[in-house]
Every structure is written in structure tokens, then in C-alpha cells.
Amino acid sequence: MKDTQALEKLYQKAFLVPPAQHLITDLIKFSECFCVVGTHLKIIGFIAVNDYYVQLLMVDPNYQNQGVGTNLIEYIKQQKTFLSLNVPIQSFPAVNFYFRR
């Protein structure tokens, strides 16, 4: 329960809007989920993958451009033969991030 609340706060901080109701709990139930934990046991990065599809990748804005997202993607790439995802074209930082991977 505390992890769900922490992930909801991280979502709001990363995307500047609250997550849709049950989004985080559904991801935890139906996806493979991995977190990066920083100091004070705070979740600073999260990825949810369903089969080969990246459902969600989020990194605390205070830790972006420090390798957190890259480490999550690289870890998943070691587990899967390929990955797919959708990124809104308006999200230029995200598009650039994924093109570099």
C-alpha cells in the first residue's frame, strides 16, 4: 500500500497530473514492475512491462538525466528479446530519450 502511494506521488511529480484511478494498482497486478530506490528508501524510478510492451516508465524529475531511466531500460533489455512502447510525439524529452536507446 505504501509503495502504491509512493508511486502515485512519483507519477504526479513526473507527469504533473494525478494518475488515473487504479492505474498504479493495475500495473502492479498485471505487469512486471521494477523500481530504483534512492536515499532514504525513496522510489526515484519505476518501469512496468507487460510481455514486451513498456506500459510505463517514470523517473523523479530531480533524478532525470542521471541514468535512472537508462538503467531501468537496460535491465529490461537484458530480460527481453525486444521491447515496444508508445510515446506521445509532444513529449520531446521522452522521444529523444528513447531514440538514444
Image: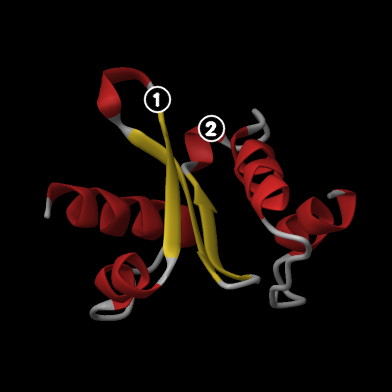
Give the quadrant of residue 1.
bottom left
Question: Any mark on residue 15, and which?
Answer: none
Q: Position of residue 50 (x, y in %)?
A: 52, 72
Give the quadrant of residue 22.
bottom left
User: Do labels 1 and 2 touch, CB within 8 Å?
Assistant: yes
Looking at the picture, the colour scheme in use is secondary structure
Which residue lies at the image location 21% right of the left edge and 49% below the top edge? 3
Residue at the left extreme, as displayed = 1
Q: Mark 1 and mark 2: span between their CA atoms?
A: 9 Å
In this orientation, which residue lies closer to the viewer: 27 or 79? 79
Amino acid carrying mark 2 in the image: Tyr
Above-or-below relation of 50 to 94: below
Which residue lies at the image location 79% right of the left edge and 57% below the top edge? 98
Q: Is 8 placed left or right of 83 in the picture?
A: left
Q: Position of residue 11 (x, y in %)?
A: 39, 58
What residue does disc 2 label? 63
Residue at the right extreme, as displayed = 100
Give the quadrant of residue 80.
bottom right
Callout 1: helix, strand or loop? loop
Q: Is 3 placed left or right of 93 in the picture?
A: left
Above-or-below relation of 84 to 66: below
Which residue lies at the image location 30% right of the left edge and 31% below the top edge? 42
Callout 2: helix, strand or loop? helix
Q: Earlier in the sequence, mark 1 or mark 2?
A: 1
Which residue lies at the image location 24% right of the left edge and 80% below the top edge? 21
Q: Position of residue 83 (x, y in %)?
A: 73, 66
Amino acid carrying mark 1 in the image: Gly
What residue does disc 1 label? 38
Total numbered badges shown on the rendered structure: 2
Above-or-below relation of 18 to 59: below
Above-or-below relation of 55 to 21: above
